[in-house]
């Protein structure tokens, strides 16, 4: 095939040299532009930010709850309500992010399929360029080794200027053709470099798609299931704490009632065994009564003594008065 193609090359045609392999070069140029546009339009950084957004939402949800005891029932209810509110908010944000991630994943899968086609096209262009280069080198070797020497020999033999000019013209065309082949080799090098670049972009797309897939089918469902478990455990903890509080209150009430019952029973027993009037009270009362009687008797005795003394004094006064009266009569 290369030999047939090489045999059809006419270096005497300047326009042919100009257009030689130009179609394949144009295809490679357009292909490179398409590949570059694909890379430029791919914003994998946004996907990374979205994945980071998922992580942020999960971390924000897992922030430590406020510590402190405000009453077991209030605390439990507030904690669960807070967890549900956080879960609802995080779920809304994560669902939005997941929707965007799903769209990105679909686009990445499309891009991966498109890159496969681009790779095959690049391989076809590479083969086409290689054929142009091989055929061109084969034709150039024939011209340089056979046709130009033949023309130079003819010019030397004939001595005609036109024969010498023909040899020079062919040599100049061969030099131009050599440069053209060199340009084609540079273009082929672009094609060679394009192949691993395509695979690299394709690999990045695949890895990012797998990362999104893992987030959608593993991370998010796992987080939701763990959230359900967390809420369930909090319900259980709240119930256990409430039961513990009730038990503690019951035990405390029983202890207080037992202590009160003991005190009441003892006081009742003491009061039941106590006389209506205490002996001490009777003794005190009796002592007071005896003391009172003694005092009365003492007062009465003193009164009698004073009355007796008064009677004696009255008798003395009376006698004294009588004596004075008798003296006055004498």
Image (spheres, rainbow, N blue to C red):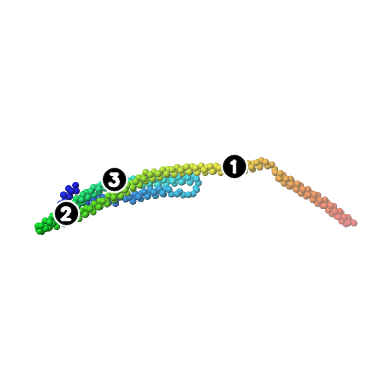
Q: Quadrant of the C terminus?
A: bottom right
Nearer the camera: disc 1 or disc 3: 3
Alpha carbons under labels 2 and 3: distance apart: 48 Å
Q: Nearer the viewer, residue 70 or 202?
A: 202
Nearer the camera: disc 2 or disc 3: 2
Q: Nearer the viewer, residue 270 or 226?
A: 226
Dot 1 or dot 2: first in sequence order is 2
Residue at left offset 75%, top offset 46%:
290
Residue on which disc 1 sits:
258
Q: Residues within 10 Å of mark 1 (few under 14, many from 20)?
A: few
Q: Position of residue 22 (x, y in %)?
A: 20, 51
Alpha carbons under labels 1 and 3: distance apart: 83 Å
Q: Nearer the viewer, residue 109 or 285?
A: 109
Dot 1 or dot 3: first in sequence order is 3
Alpha carbons under labels 1 and 2: distance apart: 126 Å
Q: Which mark is residue 67?
A: none
Q: Residues within 10 Å of mark 3 (few under 14, many from 20)?
A: few
Q: Which mark is residue 145?
A: 2
Task: Give the secondary structure at mark 1.
Answer: helix
Task: Give the secondary structure at mark 2.
Answer: helix
Residue at left offset 10%, top offset 58%:
159
Q: Which mark is residue 113?
A: 3
Q: Are marks 2 and 3 in contact (CB under 8 Å)?
A: no
């Amino acid at each position: 095939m290369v030999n047939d193609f090489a045999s059809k090359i006419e270096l005497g045609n300047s326009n042919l040299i100009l257009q030689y392999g130009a179609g394949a070069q144009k295809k490679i140029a357009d292909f490179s532009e398409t590949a570059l546009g694909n890379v430029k339009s791919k914003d994998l950084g946004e996907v990374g930010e979205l994945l980071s957004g998922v992580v942020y939402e999960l971390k924000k949800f897992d922030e430590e709850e406020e510590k402190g005891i405000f009453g077991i029932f209030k605390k439990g209810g507030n904690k669960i309500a807070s967890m549900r509110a956080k879960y609802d908010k995080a779920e809304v944000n994560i669902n939005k992010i997941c929707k965007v991630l799903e769209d990105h994943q679909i686009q990445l899968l499309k891009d991966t399929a498109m890159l496969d086609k681009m790779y095959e096209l690049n391989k076809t262009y590479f083969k086409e360029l290689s054929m142009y280069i091989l055929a061109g080198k084969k034709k150039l070797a024939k011209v340089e080794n056979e046709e130009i020497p033949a023309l130079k020999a003819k010019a030397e033999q004939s001595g005609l200027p036109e024969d010498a000019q023909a040899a020079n013209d062919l040599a100049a065309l061969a030099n131009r053709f050599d440069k053209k082949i060199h340009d084609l080799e540079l273009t082929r090098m672009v094609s060679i470099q394009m192949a691993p670049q395509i695979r690299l972009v394709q690999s990045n797309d695949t890895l990012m798609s797998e990362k999104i897939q893992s987030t959608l089918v593993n991370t998010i469902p796992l987080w939701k299931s763990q959230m359900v478990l967390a809420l369930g455990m909090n319900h259980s903890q709240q119930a256990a704490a409430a039961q513990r509080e009730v038990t503690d209150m019951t035990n405390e009430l029983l202890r207080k009632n037992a202590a009160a019952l003991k005190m009441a029973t003892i006081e009742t027993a003491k009061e039941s065994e106590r006389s209506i009037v205490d002996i001490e009270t009777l003794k005190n009362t009796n002592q007071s009564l005896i003391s009172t009687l003694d005092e009365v008797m003492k007062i009465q005795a003193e009164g009698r003594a004073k009355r007796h003394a008064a009677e004696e004094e009255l008798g003395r006064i009376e006698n004294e008065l009588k004596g004075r009266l008798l003296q006055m009569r004498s």
